[in-house]
Each structure stands twice: as C-alpha cells, then as structure tokens.
Amino acid sequence: MATYTIHIREHVPEAWFEGFRLDHLPDHSTCLTGPLRDQAALHGLLMRIRDLNLTLVSVELVETEEQS
C-alpha cells in the first residue's frame, strides 16, 4: 500500500474519485491524495484520468507502508 498525491489541471467533482481527499486549488486545479494498493491500481487510476480527458500535472509518492 502506498499513498500518492496526483495533481490534475482541472477542477473535478469529489464523486469522480471516491476514497481520495480532493483539494481544490485557487488556480482551479485539483490534488487527489489517497492510498493505492499496488502499481496496477496506480495505472488504473491514471487510465481513468486519461479516459476523463483530464490533464495530469504530476504524480508524487507520498508514503509507502514500509515508511509508516
């Protein structure tokens, strides 16, 4: 399990990414923060962002189980 912060250029509704904390920033972008069980889950989330035609700004690994 690992926690990621994913920055998206657009403002997105919270219902699109249940289980993630959404921070809507002043520039109308959104940061999603939440746990993903493995790399396959991360790739699935990135494909969902692509399928929603959202602009990915960055992906940051915040913490892994080993670090906590």
Image (spheres, helix red, strand yellow):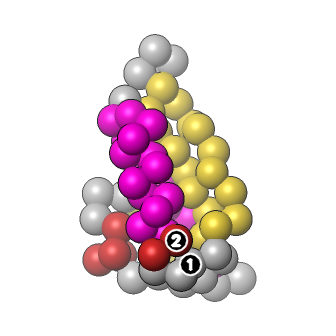
Any mark on residue 66, and which? none
The residue indicated by pointer 2 is 50
Quarter holding residue 37? top left
In the image, 46: left or right of 35? Answer: right
Callout 1–callout 2 Cβ contact below 8 Å: yes
| Residue 20 is inside the magenta segment | no
In the image, 40: left or right of 25? Answer: left
Quarter holding residue 58? bottom right
**Residue 6 screen position, x and y as percent:** 57, 57
Residue at 39% across, 54% down? 44
- Say which amino acid is labelled 1: Leu
- Say which amino acid is labelled 2: Arg
Q: Is residue 12 above or below residue 4?
A: below
- Front residue of 9/51: it is 51
Residue at 39% across, 41% down? 40
The residue indicated by pointer 1 is 54
